[in-house]
């Protein structure tokens, strides 16, 4: 849902005269306000709903910045850099915030506190590897996934358990921590399974590109 909502926000931002970088900063304000609530606010049902709304709005605005860039005739390297850096900080700080919030309010669930750490490692290294894939492929003149037309609907459905928007929705249950703990752990498991499978595939892809270009 983030892209359809992002299109509406992009249209609004364009008519308000916002630049893509300003849209990225708006996204960051929503996202990091929600992350701050996870880490420091009481664990209650209203706080959980507020976190979901803030993270979801941040995600939608994150989709809007690239669309605003296209409406204005194209983006910039600085804007792309800013977008990736904000996303990298978001990925790290979200799971750190879950760790802090759970420790502050549910310190007795100490073994569970390993889950955000594992989730953080999987999410961060997956994001880094995806960016590195595109960088190395562009360097060798190999089309990226986006340039080849993206993914199929079936693949998109299979990827739903790793979708950030669904993870945002899980925070609706933040006030019922026992439920949230199970949901979050399942998302972490999906992230780890994808991480292991994706890194294996991507390494083989890079080896294949190297072999093909060496043989040419």
Image: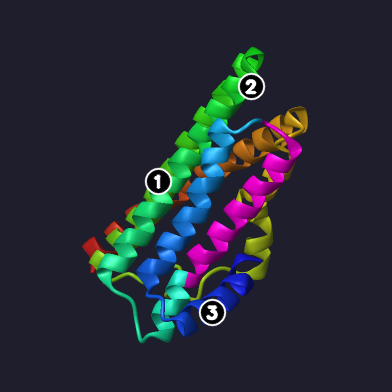
Q: Secondary structure at mark 3?
A: helix
| Horizontal and vertical percent position of residue 173 | 74, 39
| Horizontal and vertical percent position of residue 190 | 63, 42
- Examine the structure image and report whether residue 56 is included in the region drawn in magenta: yes
**Disc with the residue nearer the chain's start (1 vs 2):** 1
* C-alpha gap between disc 1 and disc 3: 26 Å
- The furthest residue to the top: 108
Using the image, tell me which numbered label, if any, was put on residue 89. Answer: 1
Report the magenta residues as a range. Answer: 43-64
**Disc with the residue nearer the chain's start (1 vs 3):** 3
For the point 61% across and 25% down, which residue is it? 102
The local crowd at label 2, few if under 14, some if 14 to 19, many if 20 or more residues have their Cα within 10 Å, is some
Pointer 3: what residue?
Answer: 12
Which of the 4 quarters of the picture holds residue 116? top right
Pointer 2: what residue?
Answer: 105
**Disc with the residue nearer the chain's start (3 vs 2):** 3
Cβ atoms under marks 1 and 3 closer than 8 Å: no
* Quarter containing the C terminus: bottom left
Say above or below: 63 vs 167.
Answer: below
Q: Secondary structure at mark 1?
A: helix
Number of marks: 3
Closest to the camera, between mark 1 and mark 3, is 3
Say above or below: 137 vs 149.
Answer: above
């Amino acid at each position: 849902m983030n892209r359809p909502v992002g299109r509406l926000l992009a249209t609004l931002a364009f008519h308000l005269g916002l630049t893509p970088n300003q849209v990225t900063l708006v996204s960051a304000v929503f996202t990091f306000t929600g992350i701050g609530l996870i880490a420091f606010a009481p664990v209650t049902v209203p706080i959980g709903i507020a976190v979901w709304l803030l993270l979801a709005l941040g995600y939608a605005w994150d989709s809007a910045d690239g669309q605003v860039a296209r409406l204005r005739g194209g983006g910039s390297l600085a804007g792309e850099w800013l977008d990736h850096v904000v996303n990298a900080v978001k990925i790290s700080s979200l799971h750190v915030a879950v760790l802090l919030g759970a420790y502050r309010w549910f310190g007795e669930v100490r073994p569970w506190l390993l889950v955000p750490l594992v989730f953080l490692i999987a999410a961060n290294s997956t994001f880094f590897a995806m960016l590195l894939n595109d960088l190395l492929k562009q360097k060798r003149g190999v089309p990226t996934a986006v340039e080849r037309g993206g993914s199929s609907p079936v693949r998109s459905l299979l990827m739903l358990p790793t979708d950030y928007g669904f993870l945002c929705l899980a925070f609706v249950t933040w006030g019922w921590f026992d439920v949230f703990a199970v949901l979050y752990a399942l998302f972490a498991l999906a992230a780890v399974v994808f991480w292991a499978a994706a890194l294996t595939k991507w390494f083989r892809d890079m080896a294949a590109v190297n072999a093909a270009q060496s043989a040419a």
